[in-house]
Image (cartoon, rainbow, N blue to C red):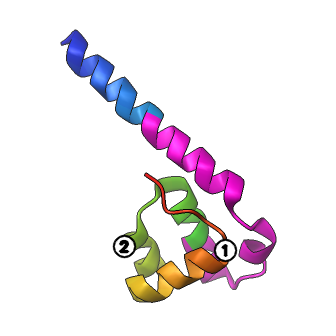
Amino acid sequence: MGELSAKLREWIEYFEEAREVRRRFANWEFIKSQPPKLRVALEYFIEVGDLYNAAKLAGMSVEEFNELRIKAGIPSVG
């Protein structure tokens, strides 16, 4: 049980670090200038790192959203 708990803590730490990297490198001025639907999708991606669902929130294909993510300076980590 202790090994499982340690692995779980390790994964949680990994995802928290990935979220912090996405937050740090994001171009917040660009993100804030987007229409609400796109802004929410970008912020969702920053927090969760889920490209597929972020694209659905934005009403875009994954490829289209990925291009928006790149314009927003958000690295794909995690």
The residues colored magenta run 14-41
> 14 above or below 60?
above
Residue 59 visible in the current orientation: no
As helix, strand or loop, the secondary structure at mark 2 comes to helix
Residue 61 visible in the current orientation: yes
Residue 24 lies in the magenta stretch: yes
Q: Quadrant of residue 2?
A: top left
**Mark 1 / mark 2, whichever is N-terminal:** 2
Residue 28 is left or right of residue 42, and the answer is right
Measured from the top left, where is residue 70 in percent x and y? 59, 76
Q: Disc 2 residue type?
A: Tyr
Q: Residue at x 42, y 70 (%)?
A: 51
Residue 72 shows which numbered tag? 1
Relative depth, front residue between 49 and 75: 75
Relative depth, front residue between 64 and 40: 64
Q: Are marks 1 and 2 in contact (CB under 8 Å)?
A: no
Q: Quadrant of residue 17?
A: top right
Which residue matches tag 2?
A: 52
Quarter placement of the N terminus:
top left
Q: Disc 1 residue type?
A: Ala
Q: Kindly give the residue lying farthest to the left in the view shown.
A: 1
